[in-house]
Image (cartoon, rainbow, N blue to C red):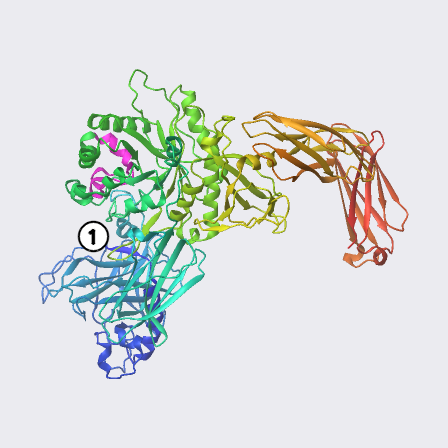
Amino acid sequence: MPRRRPPSPLLRALAAAAAVAAALAAHAQPAPRNAADDGSPDSHDAARRVVTIFDFEEKNLDAPDFNPDPVPRYWFRAQDDPGDPSAVPPRSPRPRPGFPAWNTAAFDFSVAASGNASVRLDAAGGSTSLRLVPGVIPVFPGADYAVTARVRTRGADRSRAFLTARFLDAARRPIDGAEVRSAPIASENNWTDAAIELRGEFPNAAFLQIDLELLQPREFRPQSVERLGRHAVQLDDIDASAWFDDVAVFLVPRVTLACDAPGNVTVAPNRPVIRFAVRDMVGDTPLVRLTVRDIDGAPVCTHTAEMDPSGRSLTWAPDLPGLGWYTVAIEVMRDEASVAAAQTQIAWLPAPGPSRALDAHRLAEARRFGLAADDAPPGLPAWPDFLPHVARAVGAGFLILPHADPTAAPNQLARSLGLDRSPLDELLDQGHEVTLSFAAAPMRLADALRIDPRDTLALARHGEEVWTPLLLPILDQYGQRILRWQIGPSNNAAYAAGHPNLRESLAAFDTGLSRLVPGPVLTIPWRAGLPPPPAHASDGGSDSRSTPLDAVTLVLPHDAPLADLAPAVAAWRNLAADADARAPEITIVLEPPPPASARSAAALGELIKRAVEIIRLIGEEPPGSPPLRAAVLSPWRWSDGQRPAPLPEPQLPLWRTVTDHLAGRRIVTELPVAPGVRCVVLADAADEDGPGDATDLRPQRGALVAWNDGASETDAVLHAYLGENPLTRIDLFGNAVPLTRNDDPAGTYTIPIPRTPVIIEGIDPRMVRFLASFRIAPSFASAMLTVHEHDLVLENPWPIRISGQLQIVSPDPNAPGWTISPAGIIPFDIAPGATARIPISFSFRASEETGRKTFSILVKLTADRTYPAQLLSAPLDIGSETLDFAAEAALSDDGEGPDVIVTATVTNRGDHPRTVRLDASAPGRPTQQFPVSNLGPGETAVRRFVFKDAAPTLAGKRIRVSLADAEAPERLNVSVTVP
């Protein structure tokens, strides 16, 4: 089956070189020629690599090779042909269902990418193909070739243009597996580049053949597992066209590039080693340039080397700046131009460190995090050999894997899986829990049953005799060790929600599996945001086996709001409560963004935020419910080509950071920094089960996860004491940078908080909880000339009684305008796990401005030891509960003056009318007043104060605007600065 794939860097380089080669060729010859035969030692390398070019300029009457036919020389219309035995010579039948004879291809002299002509393929229902006559282009066995073309379309709403090529043997017959088709092309009225690459991996290859195609969906969708099936109704375009021009064939170097580690995943202290080779039939000694780029595409190191053209491989250990995810590109250079290229992806993960999960409790916590990799493309290994290495490197507690390759016939299933030496054995021996996803039915079976191959739930209605043979080879070997089965793929999580007879289908699978293995556990993928199915009662009785819908794989799409996750988890938990059933086991699967947008630090930062939300949900598990688990979807993909290689995606090393620093922890509080900044405090789960033993005062180690969601860089700075332990800053990929403590008696740190989340390891979670607990309650004070009664609140997170002293330092109790009691040293004493509320009172003068104030206290604390004195702050808002008041200053005449205009706005949010007076006082100017009478509930009044000719004298000065209630001692003050 042809393999569709986008142009590689190699082919993009060749497509660019095609224009150069065309210019160098005096006239493109339809018959192939060896570029080295021109006898010129200094020919441009692009021209030397050109095998042939078809520019379709064959209608020049004065040219010796004038072509009177409607199609180019050596090409024919490869449409359905019943044949004609009476013709001379007899014409053999060529059955091509889907390629009707009424669709034609011909020269077009009104549209061309270059020169005066192109070829146009028209489709009026059905598909169209123009094919090169077999034997026109001979090839070298073992050589690699590329085919490029310029393509444009019109009216291709459903149909698509394709460039296809294949190797033929000496008898001019197609070689199995030697055909490559381009990605589908829809380029409405614009020329675009198409390119494909054929690897010389077929020793019997003798010729190369090209197809120019305009295909309807039924012809190209069967190449994808997402097809609807051959019996589904699919609409055709009935008036579509595709143009092809400058079709070129190149002899290209064979470039291989890989990392010397299973799955391209290297674990420190080992360093990534790149292995590369170039085999070039043109000769000479090629120069190669390798470039490594980071997650944001910035180059981090380069390397150049001379290659042996025979293909002998070399190695390079790049000097990477740190752990992480990188792309490695290689270019083959000739005369400073790139003639071939290749690219791969590598991941470099931290060395295994001292585990925080030493006891059984913490080990179970670490097993909550896994990988969902059940989306293997058809034709590739369902359980690749690198799986055990990657699972161990990431620290995955569980994996969701496909049950088989859907292209394998049932009688070939055991052989295709290699059950005699399966990586599953090593995964299970390492302690990883495995869920096998019945993600797709064999394609031939799906066609026969007229179902979507990915709709495995639909198999249930056809009886156990249909689907059990697909599982028996696996159950025979792993039925006692793998009990978990997912019905449906994780990357199609919406299909089950609208599936007819969902419960009956699950019951059929449950019954059938139970006859084969003891106690199977079934789960289905379900998209977060979709309501769960109706509640159902449990089976009852003494059977403790899981029943259908006792487990769910809850997939959070990459573009779904994070706020969808908590309600989705709650809905599934409530489903069990409503039915008086056991709570389902929930596995949250995070879908990463598409590769084009996922490969950035910002996109990975969003995954960290989602992981933090999962930690919060884990901390809110109801007692006795199954452990909430989490996985990341599609942690690797496969390269294009005839020998696909695994390519780790950025979420793979990121998930190692999650398992290292978030697994086994709970969110205990948030540390206030500034509006728009999140600073989540984590502590080990085993340390947070309760107040604890008063004799257990071992120092705790926790972490912060912090990010800036909208504050300015100036405000997004954490300045705090975080404990006596040394602190390290951990980035998305686990790189640790020591932090330096400030040179002050309090032992504080100053840490800028970026927009991409960072992890701060080593904090003392008890001390940070104590510091974060400080607040003033209530945090709002009415702007009234009275004595206000509030509390200073502190919490004790230690398992012992704590004591200390505090003193209010801001607002300054001794400054004029504020009166605060008590004004001196205030002792406190707090029981284990308790909260202290220390009463205070204060008043302020009538001129105090409304808005946010900062209450600060100096605290000296003795707990498990005596801590350095710390300055703690909490906000206090002064204003009105029923009036909104604001003012702004501007200059008259569109900002030029000479008058200063102050606009005051007041809104009544109360439930009865208000009468107030507005005053505006400017330096050196008489105070102006405006009354506002009977301002009704919900009404807004606007008043403008005009200070004539005041712009020159008041520039940069402040004007005070006040609101006084005629019936209450409430006074609101704001100041505005004159521009």
- Kindly identify the amino acid type of the residue bearing the numbered disc 1: Pro
Residue 234 showing in the rendered view = yes
Dividing the image into 4 quarters, which one contains the C terminus? bottom right
Q: Which residue is mark 1?
A: 97
Residue 872 picture location, percent across and down: 65, 39
- Corner quadrant of residue 468: top left
Q: Nearer the viewer, residue 390 or 234?
A: 390
Nearer to the camera, 280 or 76 = 280
The reply, left or right, for residue 396 in relation to residue 167 is right
Q: On screen, 729 above or below 399?
A: below
Placement of 400 over or under 132, stated as above or below: above
In-front residue for pair 965/897: 965
Farthest residue to the top: give it.
541
Q: Residues within 10 Å of mark 1 (few under 14, many from 20)?
A: few
Report the span colored magenta.
Answer: 434-463
Quarter holding residue 488? top left
Image position of 475 (left or right of 373): left
Residue 444 belongs to the span the image colors magenta: yes
579 lies above or below 862:
above
Q: Is residue 445 left or right of residue 762?
A: left
Residue 133, position in %: x, y?
18, 67
Whether residue 109 appears in this view of the structure is: no
In percent of width and height, residue 88 lies at: 9, 67
Total marks drawn? 1
